[in-house]
Image (cartoon, rainbow, N blue to C red):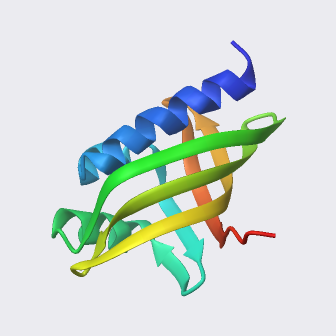
Amino acid sequence: MSAHREFDELLQAWSVAIVANDPEAIGRFATPDWVLVGSTGVFPRAAFLDAVATGRLTHDAMTHEIHEVREYGDVAVVLSHGRNHGTMMGEEFTNDEWISEVFVRGADGWRCSVTHLTAAVSG
């Protein structure tokens, strides 16, 4: 299987877990030290999963389009374009983002270590 297809399937499965708002399933795709980096700073794994578990963060839609996969042995960088919709603390949001992710391959397969989000801007 090509790396592009492998990561496309992985990201689709992770998206299903996120849209299901299932913190345990979401956590299976991330390393214990995973962080999400966005416009407001660094959001550690525990804070993200807690926000989902308590319902402060919910998703009802998420898509990804992979643009490039770069593999370096047991490390891979995945560059994609994503869109998602949900609520944060009761406020509805819609995001259109460019995403850079670092994955690490271990005994349990590929898991994400860093997700960096950049708002897409129409140009």
Q: Where is residue 9 in the image (x, y as percent from the top left)?
A: 54, 27
Q: Which residue is drawn at 74% across and 69% down?
A: 122
User: In the displayed structure, would residue 24 be above or below residue 38?
Assistant: above
Where does the N terminus fall, quadrant-wise?
Answer: top right
Where does the C terminus fall, quadrant-wise?
Answer: bottom right
User: In the displayed structure, would residue 49 be above or below residue 66?
Assistant: below
Side of 39 relative to 70 (left or right): left
Q: Where is residue 85 in the image (x, y as percent from the top left)?
A: 39, 61
Q: Position of residue 42 (x, y in %)?
A: 55, 80
Q: Residue at x 43, y 33 (%)?
A: 13
Q: Quadrant of residue 37?
A: bottom right
Q: Which residue lies furthest to the front in this view?
A: 123
Side of 110 relative to 121 (left or right): left
Q: How many labels does the image show?
A: 0
Q: Nearer the viewer, residue 73 or 11?
A: 11
Side of 58 relative to 37 (left or right): left
User: In the displayed structure, would residue 98 be above or below residue 102?
Assistant: below
Q: Which of 64 and 27 is in front in this view?
A: 64
Q: Which residue is drawn at 23% across and 49% down?
A: 22
Q: Where is residue 102 in the image (x, y as percent from the top left)?
A: 68, 52
Q: Which residue lies furthest to the top in this view?
A: 1
Q: Residue at x 29, y 71 (%)?
A: 87
Q: Residue furthest left?
A: 54
